[in-house]
Amino acid sequence: MADLEFERRLERLFADAPELPDARGFAERIERRLDRGWNLRRWLIGAAGLAGGVVGASQLVLSNLFDRMETAEHSARVLGQGLARVTPASDMVSALSGGYGVWIAVGLAVVTLGFAVSRVIEEI
């Protein structure tokens, strides 16, 4: 078992630590360094996002996206016709196709918005 008197004395010593003569200058140097780091991070993240956007756009252009859209529309039409022939096998599928799926999506969106708002409030 730890000596309570020693621990209390130790806590008082740490609580009453003397202020060093260069404490203000030290704090200002650290704050400048931290601010510089955030600016650098913002620029790096922005540059990475820009590079990713350029790569993504070039891949879309080079992959003949517009020619393939016609094929995709045809495939979607065929798939839709095939799904129209299938009848729902369970109540869950029929509930989702009956309009309840929209309400489930709205509920999930509200929950997600709640998480986002709580995160913003936490940052403030």
Image (cartoon, rainbow, N blue to C red):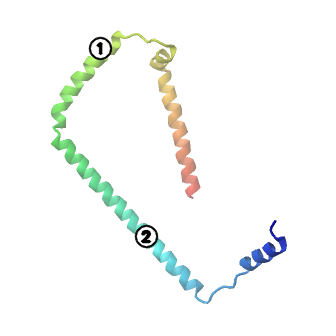
SS category of the residue bearing label 1:
helix
Position of 66 relative to 29 (above/below): above
Q: Quadrant of the C terminus?
A: bottom right
Pinpoint residue 77: horizontal percent, then vertical percent: 26, 19
Q: Earlier in the sequence, mark 1 or mark 2?
A: 2
Which quarter of the figure is the N terminus placed in? bottom right
Is residue 99 toward the left or the right of residue 11 in the image? left
In the picture, the disc for residue 37 is 2
Q: Quadrant of residue 59?
A: top left
Q: Residue at 32% of width from left, 57% of height from top?
A: 48
Residue 86, image x, y percentages: 37, 11
Q: Amino acid at mark 2?
A: Gly
Residue drawn 24% across the image and 22% down it: 75
Q: Which corner quadrant of the image does residue 36 belong to?
A: bottom left
Image vertical order of residue 26 relative to residue 86, above or below: below
Cα–Cα gap, marks 1 and 2: 56 Å
The one nearer the camera, 10 or 41, is 10
